[in-house]
Image (cartoon, grey):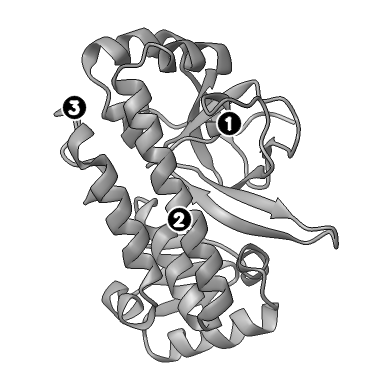
Amino acid sequence: MSKPAIQSPHSPTQNHLLAALPDAEFARLAPHLDLVPMRLGETLHEPGCTLQYAYFPTTAIVSLLHGLSSGVSVEVAGVGNEGVVGIALFMGADSSPTSAVVQTAGCGYRLGGRVLKEEFDRAGLVQRLLLRYTQALVTQIFQSGACNRHHSVEQQLCRWLLLTLDRMPSSELVMTQELIAGALGVRREGITEAAGRLQDAGYIRYRRGHISVLDRAGLEGRTCECYAVVKTEFARLLCDVRHPRIDAVLGI
């Protein structure tokens, strides 16, 4: 099977972490960054397996999934152009307890684990940036767990749609209700009912696996506080590592 075409122009600075690097650090990493297609459903790493690469998504979105003994997997966090997949490489481990599966097809940049570790061990801005990002990611994981336990399916769906929308260049999402239900760990019927209410309110339009967000403010008004908590924490932790290469890290 042929590889999907990679549209150009494409740049590592479409990933906000890479864009935040000063020139010297970026210059050291740039020769080792490989642009790769990230296909829908592709598994980047599995639980317990030795990680070889880190991935910096640009137009793709990756779900970090935790598997249960029943065979069910639940999304604990998402990673898009704001982050990196493979934090275990610089956190003192070579494997992760989660799997990483492409949720939205697109592209990203792959970096060898050895190169990332060497740059991290310089104890410069790369280390600081990655540690700050990791703390923000942990906040997302904790908040997602609390949200899935205590908030309604409709609130969870709004949170998930808004976080996905933040990582997309448009308001059109290619997403099935079955995929969303699996990510949130709820029954598909619950997602169908919640999406129906949002559509009736004029906030979204759903058709054949495509979701169009028509009223973002409406979604923000129907979601719980968890969306704002995650977004605010990313902004707080990364606000002082911005670099003029981009206008605004994280699109805030």
On the image, the x and y values in percent for residue 165 come to: 39, 59
Q: Which residue is mark 2?
A: 140
Q: Nearer the viewer, residue 208 or 128?
A: 128
- Which residue sits at x=48%, y=90%? 197
Tell whether label 1 touches label 2 (CB within 8 Å): no
Q: SS of the residue at dot 1?
A: helix
Q: Is residue 197 left or right of residue 167?
A: right
Q: Is residue 38 visible?
A: yes
Name the amino acid, label 2.
Gln
- Which residue sits at x=45%, y=77%? 205
Classify residue 163 by image quadrant: bottom left
On the image, the x and y values in percent for residue 8 come to: 39, 28
Q: Nearer the viewer, residue 43 or 232?
A: 232
Q: Which residue is mark 3?
A: 245
Q: CA distance from mark 3 to mark 1?
A: 27 Å
Classify residue 222 by image quadrant: bottom left
Outermost residue on the right side: it is: 70
On the image, the x and y values in percent for residue 28 come to: 36, 8
Q: Quadrant of the N terminus?
A: top right
Name the amino acid, label 1.
Ala
Name the amino acid, label 3.
Arg
Q: Earlier in the sequence, mark 2 or mark 1?
A: 1
Q: Which residue is mark 1?
A: 88
Residue 150, label in figure: none
Q: Residues within 10 Å of mark 1 (few under 14, many from 20)?
A: some
